[in-house]
Image (cartoon, helix red, strand yellow):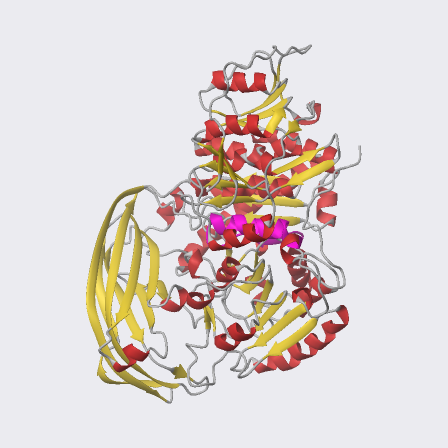
């Protein structure tokens, strides 16, 4: 790896004349009386992308103004990719992005926090975040008349820092961290010739030669930011909601782990939809004790074929492992299968809140063909060894994020859109109060309907804070423009940190309870909402990059049949043919007049093998699937000899590589369910992980009302962003349950290429001309 090292300590021998300014003093920002300081910083432009470690969320914060800035003096803006790495390694998706984005560039990467394994030229600034912030400021800026100083420490201080960080981008100034390092901050301010500093929180910091503006609380930060946004952009189109508690790991007191290994031998046939065992048993049940208190259960299962068996040698199909976990009352608290995880492996987890007792884990294996929709038939020949590992972690509190650290990217996302950030730890579902309400429950509201009132009250209080923010916009004369525009709202959080609302009634043929929805955050479809999630923070960071640098990745339009113009449709079997005949075929012909090249794949051309051979999903701009689905797969091909091996499941599609950032639209059941699930086990998020840039799906079962025509017309004909298109559809189509359960995963401001309108600016703001 090629590196250029930057020292972490300031050069103490550098001689700089003291800075004096008439009227030096300190003031607290407050409302309209606020006097904004804005001087021009001089930046060094030496990099193409920023990559930070995930070991400290402040690293993302301090790099925000390095990766995104606005220079009002020259009426220019700058935006660089901001990626997050884990333990020095980039994901495959991040590597592919950099390979396309950097191309022949000579500048390379800026790496912060921890070393990175990369073939690219890299400038590394390593160490703890406060030290990195100082070195980063002097590396990125030659002079900085203004600086923003954030408090470093507790989650409450982190929340204030999240609020304030976009200010550094808007005023083009470096971010520094106060961590009992007064002398170092005085030195760096002298080196940067700083004459004014914004101090966030109630820090006891002396900067004798610098005028200080205090931003002690959320109110002061809000008024300052909204004043800056109005002065620089004239309007606001984007809000981000996030939960700072997602950077706090679970408080594990102790962990008990045990394993069990055995062998399963079974032969069975399926005739007329009924299973008949010829020998052995495909199912085993294991019981174990869950202790009192808050217990995080994690169970993994792996099988290995016994190669003494005939089918074990040939492996014509992949075995499927099913796990169902039931509490001491016989209630399902978790279930999963290998199709949702990996070949020959599966995993389930749940949080038990003082629901102690014997839990039963049912394991079932099927190995062989299974087909037919109207009348199932097949056979299974099982001879496998298996190993089960059960981990019981006793927690001090029920706090348990599904996707850790997403909030650290909120300032960058917000600043890049010229928006405003809203953050609060009280939005979390699994906070202290949950521990009392969920007493005796072995799962969350996704399997326990009695928790819906508590969850919905959480959502209602969160919506109240959103409405309060809109009132602050109104006080700054920004609300009318926001509501009359795209009114984007990004939920940068999993469904534990910012829960979904559970409408009723529950659907009786599935264990998943209620109809989870993001609708309340739309304020009666006034706002265009998207939940910005993927597998983990690494995935979300590259999803951000694919959105902001979408045009770079798509490349130039080459002709009427290239990727930009392709819209591929697929309908499934098992009554889904009606959707193919009455929607997909006529609609595919209709949109050809808008420049699209379309193809429809239906019965006997809709298996995963054919899709991979023809690149049906991975080589087209727009994708639509209409058919049966679940949270771990969509089995389009049902009529043939075997449906399992032909299905599109997480285990097989997670390693797909999309040619370019496609958009995936689904009219199928449950493909958008993420509540209560590990993010890596959802089929929609697997598509984002593989390279899609937006996913529309349903959190529960849907029916004939789940058409996509209105949404697609908003995208193609009206040239709306995907968030606006979903909002527009729900203003017209209110039929249940699709109205409740259809959700967007991705940036609501993302606007894919259409031949008639070309590329958009992806919701980037425009500076007012001085």
Pinpoint residue 538: horizontal percent, then vertical percent.
48, 49
- Name the residue at 65% across, 77% down: 583
Pinpoint residue 346: horizontal percent, then vertical percent.
34, 64
- Name the residue at 21% across, 58% down: 259
Pinpoint residue 699: horizontal percent, then vertical percent.
51, 63
Task: Classify 19 as above or below 62.
Answer: above
**Which quadrant holds the C terminus?**
top right
Residue 464, by quadrant, is top right
542 magenta-colored: yes
Nearer the observer, 275 or 371: 371
Q: In the current view of this chain or complex, which residue is farthest to the bottom? A: 272
Q: State which region is magenta.
A: 525-551
Left or right placement of residue 474 versus residue 464 in this view:
right
Left or right placement of residue 284 versus residue 514 in this view:
left
Left or right placement of residue 734 versus residue 324 in this view:
right
Nearer the observer, 319 or 659: 659
613 magenta-colored: no
- Name the residue at 69% across, 64% down: 732
Residue 668, by quadrant, is bottom right
Q: How many marks?
A: 0
């Amino acid at each position: 790896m090629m590196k250029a090292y930057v020292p972490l300590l300031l050069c103490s021998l550098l001689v700089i004349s003291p800075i004096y300014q008439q009227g030096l003093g300190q003031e607290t920002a407050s409302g309209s009386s606020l006097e904004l300081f804005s001087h021009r910083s001089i930046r060094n432009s030496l990099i193409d992308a920023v990559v930070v470690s995930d070991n400290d969320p402040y690293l993302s914060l301090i790099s925000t103004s390095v990766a995104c800035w606005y220079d009002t003096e020259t009426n220019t803006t700058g935006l660089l990719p901001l990626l997050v790495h884990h333990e020095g390694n980039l994901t495959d998706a991040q590597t592919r992005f950099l390979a396309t984005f950097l191309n022949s560039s000579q500048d390379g990467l800026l790496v912060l926090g921890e070393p990175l394994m990369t073939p690219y030229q890299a400038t590394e600034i390593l160490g703890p975040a406060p030290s990195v912030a100082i070195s980063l400021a002097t590396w990125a800026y030659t002079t900085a008349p203004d600086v923003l100083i954030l408090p470093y420490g507790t989650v409450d201080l982190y929340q204030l820092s999240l609020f304030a960080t976009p200010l550094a981008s808007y005023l083009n100034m470096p971010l520094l961290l106060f961590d009992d390092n007064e002398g170092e901050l005085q030195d760096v301010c002298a080196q940067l010739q700083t004459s004014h500093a914004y101090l966030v929180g109630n820090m006891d910091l002396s900067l004798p030669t610098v005028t200080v503006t205090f931003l002690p609380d959320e109110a002061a930060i809000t008024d300052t930011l909204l004043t800056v946004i109005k002065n620089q952009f004239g309007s606001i189109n984007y809000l981000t909601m996030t939960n700072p508690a997602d950077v706090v790991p679970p408080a594990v007191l102790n962990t008990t782990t045990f394993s069990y290994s055995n062998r399963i031998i079974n032969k069975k046939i399926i005739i007329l939809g009924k299973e008949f065992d010829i020998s052995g048993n495909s199912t085993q049940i294991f019981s174990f004790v869950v202790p009192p208190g808050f217990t995080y259960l994690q169970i993994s299962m792996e099988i290995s074929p016994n190669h003494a068996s005939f089918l074990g040698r040939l492996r014509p199909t992949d075995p499927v492992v099913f796990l169902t976990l039931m509490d001491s009352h016989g209630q399902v608290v978790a279930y999963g299968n290998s199709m949702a995880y990996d070949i020959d492996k599966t995993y389930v987890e749940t949080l038990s809140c003082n629901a102690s007792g014997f839990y039963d884990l049912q394991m079932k294996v099927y190995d062989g063909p299974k087909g037919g929709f109207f009348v199932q038939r097949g056979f299974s020949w099982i001879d496998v060894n298996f190993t089960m590992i059960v981990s019981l972690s006793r927690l001090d509190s029920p706090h348990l994020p599904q996707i850790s650290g997403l909030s650290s990217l909120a300032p960058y996302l917000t600043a890049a859109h010229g928006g405003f950030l809203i953050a609060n730890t009280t939005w979390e579902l699994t906070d202290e109060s949950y521990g009392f309400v969920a007493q005796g429950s072995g799962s969350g509201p996704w399997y326990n309907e009695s928790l819906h009132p508590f969850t919905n009250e959480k959502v209602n209080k969160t919506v109240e804070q959103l409405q309060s923010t809109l009132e602050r916009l109104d006080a700054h004369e920004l609300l009318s423009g926001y509501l009359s525009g795209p009114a984007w709202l990004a939920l940068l959080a999993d469904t534990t940190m910012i829960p979904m609302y559970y409408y009723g009634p529950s659907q009786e043929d599935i264990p998943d309870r209620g109809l989870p929805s993001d609708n309340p955050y739309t304020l009666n479809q006034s706002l265009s909402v998207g939940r910005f999630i993927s597998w983990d923070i690494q995935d979300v960071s590259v999803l951000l990059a694919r959105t902001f640098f979408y045009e770079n990745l798509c490349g130039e339009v080459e002709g009427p049949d290239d990727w930009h113009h392709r819209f591929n449709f697929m309908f499934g079997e098992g009554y889904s043919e009606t959707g193919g005949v009455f929607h997909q075929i006529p609609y595919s012909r209709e949109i050809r007049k808008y420049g699209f090249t379309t193809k429809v794949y239906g019965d006997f051309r809709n298996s995963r093998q054919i899709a991979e051979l023809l690149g049906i999903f991975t080589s087209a701009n727009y994708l639509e699937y209409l058919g049966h689905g679940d949270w771990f797969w969509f089995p389009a091909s049902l009529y043939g000899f075997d449906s399992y091996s032909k299905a599109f499941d997480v285990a097989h599609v997670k390693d797909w590589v999309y040619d370019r950032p496609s958009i995936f639209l689904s009219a199928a059941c449950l493909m958008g369910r993420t509540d209560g699930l590990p993010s890596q086990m959802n089929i929609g998020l697997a598509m984002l992980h593989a390279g899609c840039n937006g996913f529309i799906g349903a959190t529960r079962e849907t029916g004939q009302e789940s058409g996509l025509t209105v949404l697609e017309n908003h995208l193609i004909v009206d040239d709306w962003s995907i968030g606006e298109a979903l909002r527009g559809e729900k203003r017209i189509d209110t039929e249940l349950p699709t109205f409740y359960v259809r959700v967007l995963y991705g940036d609501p401001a993302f606007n894919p290429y259409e031949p008639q309108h070309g590329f958009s600016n992806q919701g980037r703001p425009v500076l007012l001309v001085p």
